[in-house]
Image (spheres, helix red, strand yellow):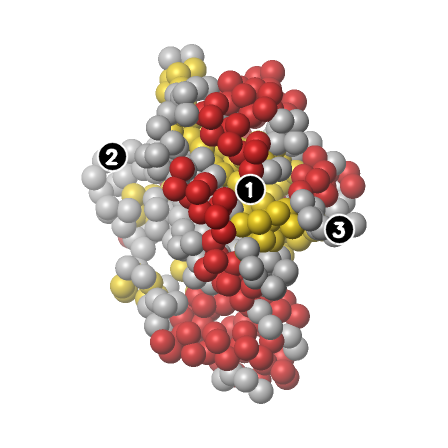
Amino acid sequence: MDLKEIARFAKIKGLHLVGSGDFTHPKWFEQIQNVLVPDSGTDLYKISGNIDDSIHFMLTTEVCTIFNFENSVKKIHHVIFAPDLEVVAQINEALKNYGNLDSDGRPILKMNAPELVEKIMDISNKNMIFPAHIWTPWFSVFGSFSGFSSIKECYQDMTKYIYALETGLSSDPPMNWRLSSLDNFTLLSNSDCHSFWPWRIGREANVFDLNRLSYGEVTGAIKNKGSQRLKFTIETDPGYGKYHWTGHRKCNISLSPKQAERFNSICPVCRKKLTKGVEQRVNELADRPLNYKTNDAPGFLRLLPLSDIIASVLNAGSPSTQAVWKIYNGLVNNFENEYSVMIDTLEPDLLKVVDSKIVAAILKIRTGNFRVIPGFDGVYGQLDLDSKNQEKKSRFGSVKQTNIDDFY
């Protein structure tokens, strides 16, 4: 996992702009300084010595603040954008007083959320900061275990510097539109890489229509929601996320919000507290009905990683098998990148390259004619191309999730 490999697979995926990640970590920042060089035409960064100018990097990181608020421990993750290496060095110098930056790519800082925002914005008004994966249970602004009930409650008087919210894998725009308090924020769909493999990088992304690719244009589009320069977001089905439904991984219990309420969010097997899913948490805070849509919201396109789709058709169990790679590489080599395969390539052209079952699955995802067995308590959701068959192969082997009906 390094910047050169991230750039290589970003191009395969169909991305043009990627976050550097982890600039607060000394070793990673050293790599950023040695590998990335400023691109004078964009005020962004690119790989040194790389003649391919299609992949650019923005300097980004994620940090964790843990603090007490009204006799409760709050644990919030935040994304930070910075315009240049000099500003990053200043950020790192300031934050090292609040935590050990060597310890993790996402350091734990002993400061509250408003303090963090104030520090970041005092260094440069070109910086941008916003809450990460806002609904996940443990480390997010709306997290059921350690979060808040509103953005204002979390950031207080520093809310004026918060322009965006990262929705996370387990929620999508329609879920967030149900909260009128979020109307003024730009909804972004970034996703942690965890690795450079194509089933990880770019699972979610943002599609901009800019005058030119630059740091200022991207952050300006985010700040000015009404400009409509953020055209749409690419989303996984929220059920694909690891915390969409309420459940208990140890007992293999997965419950919809209504089902979880019937058990008072207590596991019917071990009697311990269930991990409250994102859908249930959204229901608790929402002041609007299902299917509500704001008038000026950017659109969204729901996709799943091509590797996962191929693995599902082959019943391969993992997207990393040679059989999956062979088909994946064949498609990408013929049609430039994964997003082109998933969004633009016509059915007759796809049929010239791969088996009709693979093409049928791609078209199902493209048209929304599929379902996902929802993820829960740290377990990813599973693509179900045949809704009659609830038992599927996953990365954990053959899994049949226990449902509330099994207790009656």
Residue 1, placed above or below residue 339 = above
Q: Are marks 3 and 2 in contact (CB under 8 Å)?
A: no
Give the alpha-carbon distance from disc 1 to disc 2, as whole Å: 42 Å
Q: Secondary structure at mark 3?
A: loop
Residue 92, placed above or below residue 205 = above
Label 3, on which residue? 212
Task: Tell me what residue is drawn at x 40 percent, y 51 percent.
Answer: 194
Q: Earlier in the sequence, mark 1 or mark 2?
A: 1
Which label number is shown at residue 229? none
Task: Tell me what residue is drawn at x 71 percent, y 50 percent.
Answer: 41
- Residue 149: x percent and y percent? 51, 25
Give the alpha-carbon distance from disc 1 to disc 3, as whole Å: 18 Å
Task: Tell me what residue is drawn at x 51 percent, y 18 percent.
Answer: 115
Label 1, on which residue? 59
Label 2, on which residue? 272
Categorize mark 1 by other alpha carbons within 10 Å: few (<14), some (14-19), many (20+): many
